[in-house]
Image (tube, helix red, strand yellow):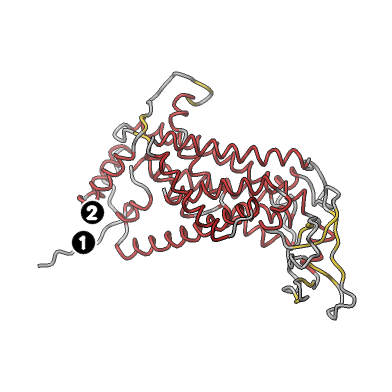
Amino acid sequence: MNTARPARQSFDSISQGDDNMDDAQRTISTKSAWLENVDEEELRDIEKVAADQAEVDVPINSKRAQCCCCDLYTLWKFTGPGWLMSIAYLDPGNLEADLQSGAYTGYQLLWMLFWSTIMGLLLQVLALRLGVVTGKNLAQMCRLEYARPTSILLWLMTETAIIGSDIQEVLGSAIALQLLFGLPLWAGCLITGLDTFTFLFIHAYGVRKLEAFFASLIFTMMVCFFVNFAWTQPVWGGAPWAPDGGGILLGTLIPTVNDYAIIQAVGILGAVIMPHNIYLHSALVQSRNVNRKNPMAVEEACKYNTIESAVALLVSFFINAAVVTVFARGFFNDQECAEPGWNEITWSGANLTLSPGAGANLGCYTGADATTAQFDSCHRVGNVNGTDLSWMNCTNSIGESGVCCSIGLSNAGKLNFFYIFYSFIHNNLLLFNIVF
């Protein structure tokens, strides 16, 4: 006897009924037809999990604290999932992309950061609407909609992305602990792994307390970099030909990409837009108990989750922009580092090995160890025989003298305590978020 389940039809391929139906009737007809193609036992299991996750009751059509187009009390009840989601927009990949964007290209890629965040918001809105309307996250919908081989392939791709993110979080925190306290990397990795699971105890006291704790630490990180932002006195206005490459307003409003900034522009886009975060957000919104049989309740849930996510991503944009501007102020030099490093053959390394020819991204590093054997990422120009080689000296926009070097967490951290503290807190938060 052949017990094989018939091939599933996609939601869009199912007939949606008579053309004379209104939208509500068409939706009911389509849903009923779709349910006929889904394993009922599997669907019940998924709905049971979703019901267990709905910990927070939310009001419907509340008028307790009206402000503009929304009720602040209702917005407060929906506040939380977007802040957990926004942590992924501040992960070590983002931080490294922001750091190097500022150090190598100045302010000119702030527009790329802004529009990448807007694109990310559109994807997050689609994800949250899926979770709110269906009561299922994206992974569950993929399992219900696609054939088993396709579902397994998607699962493997997502797991690979999660592993890639985990490696960054563990190593990022280990480097931060090494710079702060001198711990070896293996000890930092162990501490980070153990520290991550301490956040699980907070979840035992309720999802709202977990969300509040995460949001408070995000605001702590924001304060750290806003202090640095104010201390460096960034340039708001400026011309493209200025030594710092123009000001914040120019970099945000005018799309500009010099030849040496192409790699960093692609890096920002790739760091901000992350597919696995869409899976996460579609699940996080299910912590709110929404009556999906009431169209008004579903509409309000979509509205308030969208507002909350937009606010959270706006904060993440300000934090990322602060990272870019701080490191643009402290490391960027267009004429002495960025342009020569990209267009000329330079030399680096303790043994004077040739760097990858033209096309090296460089920033102005002002640390005292720039020309010592400890640092082999700083560059020289001159004759390969060594007789005429000289350091690529530079001056950053603050007026400090240094040498043109490759900039990363290690040397950036030597000059910026707030960055290391911020990185350590954030890496633990994001690693927990992936585990959660």
At label 2, counting other C-alpha atoms closer than 10 Å, the crowd grade (few under 14, some 14-19, many 20 or more) is some
Q: Is residue 32 left or right of residue 254?
A: left
At label 1, counting other C-alpha atoms closer than 10 Å, the crowd grade (few under 14, some 14-19, many 20 or more) is few
The residue under label 2 is 37
Image coordinates of residue 403 in percent, x first then y, are: 82, 61
Please, what secondary structure does the residue beneath circle 1 have?
loop
Image coordinates of residue 140 in percent, x first then y, are: 33, 51
Above/below status of 257 relative to 298: below
Q: Is residue 151 left or right of residue 177?
A: left
The residue under label 1 is 6
Asked if marks 1 and 2 touch (Cβ < 8 Å), the reply is yes
In space, the residues marked 1 and 2 are separated at their CA atoms by 8 Å
Which of 371 and 280 lies nearest the eye of the viewer? 371
Please, what secondary structure does the residue beneath circle 2 have?
loop
Image coordinates of residue 381 in percent, x first then y, are: 84, 71
Residue under the point 84% across and 65% down: 392
User: Is residue 271 in view from this perspective?
Assistant: no
Q: Earlier in the sequence, mark 1 or mark 2?
A: 1
Which of 170 and 65 lies nearest the eye of the viewer? 170
Q: Quadrant of the N terminus?
A: bottom left
The three-letter code of the residue at mark 1 reads: Pro
| Residue 295, quarter of the rendered image | top left
